[in-house]
Amino acid sequence: MQVFRIRLNSNKFQSFLPSDEKVWETDLLKLDCRPKLQSWVPPSVYIDHPDQSKGNFFHFCSAGFVVDQNAKDDLGKILEIAGELLPLPHQDALFHLVNVQQCVNCLDDEASTWVFGKTTSAKIRIAEYRFHANSLPASSLFKIPETARSEVLTVTGLSEPEEDFKTVVERKGLQGLIFEELWSNGQ
């Protein structure tokens, strides 16, 4: 089993930006494992760098990603189990911002390596991740409390291949993501 950080390949593929920068001053795009759908009002968006390739995944905000209709169709059940799909219309198409709500306390805090502040000695970020394998979620997309506002993780090897986010993305040839391995239990 392996855990990966999902990164958006915004150097090669298109990204969305809000038309009104004031949206950053609100909680609308703070994806912290809490539901948003009931109060969701999609912000107006535009494509940053339209000269770049159009992928199936688009960067938009921290701790979330946008999917096009093909990715939604191919990953629908996996995405719905993980959280909410927030509609994000743009021009003639409907995209969806994925709000992952599966937040699982599965980080092995003691075995993980942390970067500490020089003056405060406070934990700043995780340098090396270690997980409790028996605490990893059934959902292949998840977050951990320590980084819920900044990253989405995916686990492979816990479920059937058709329920495994990374496997389906690769098998279907969906583009726009980078999977950065954080941990493996060696099996």
Image: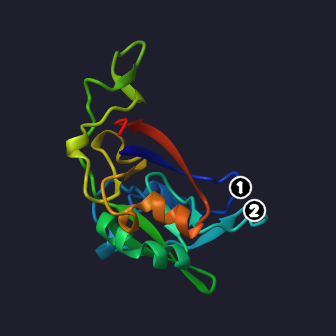
Q: Residues within 10 Å of mark 1 (few under 14, many from 20)?
A: some
Vertical order, 123 against 52 (above or below): above
Tell me residue 118's x, y (percent). Answer: 42, 13
SS class, disc 2: loop
Element at badge 1?
A: loop
| Res 42 seen here | no
Residue drawn at 39 percent across, 44 percent down: 2
Q: Where on the picture, by quarter, is residue 160?
A: bottom left
Give 42 or 181, whichever is nearer the viewer: 181
Task: List the residue tagged with mark 1.
Answer: 12
Q: Which amino acid does label 1 sit on?
A: Lys
The outermost residue toward the right is: 51
Between 120 and 157, the one lying in front of the other is 157
Packing grade of label 2 (10 A; few <14, some 14-19, many >=20) is some
The numbered mark at residue 52 is 2
In which quadrant of the rendered image does the N terminus lie? top left
Task: Give yes or no for contact between labels 1 and 2 (Cβ–Cβ under 8 Å).
Answer: yes
Q: Which residue is drawn at 37% across and 32% down?
A: 129
Residue at mark 1 to residue at mark 2: CA–CA distance: 6 Å
- 82 lies above or below 155: below
Looking at the figure, which quarter contains the C terminus? top left
The residue sitting at the top extreme is: 119
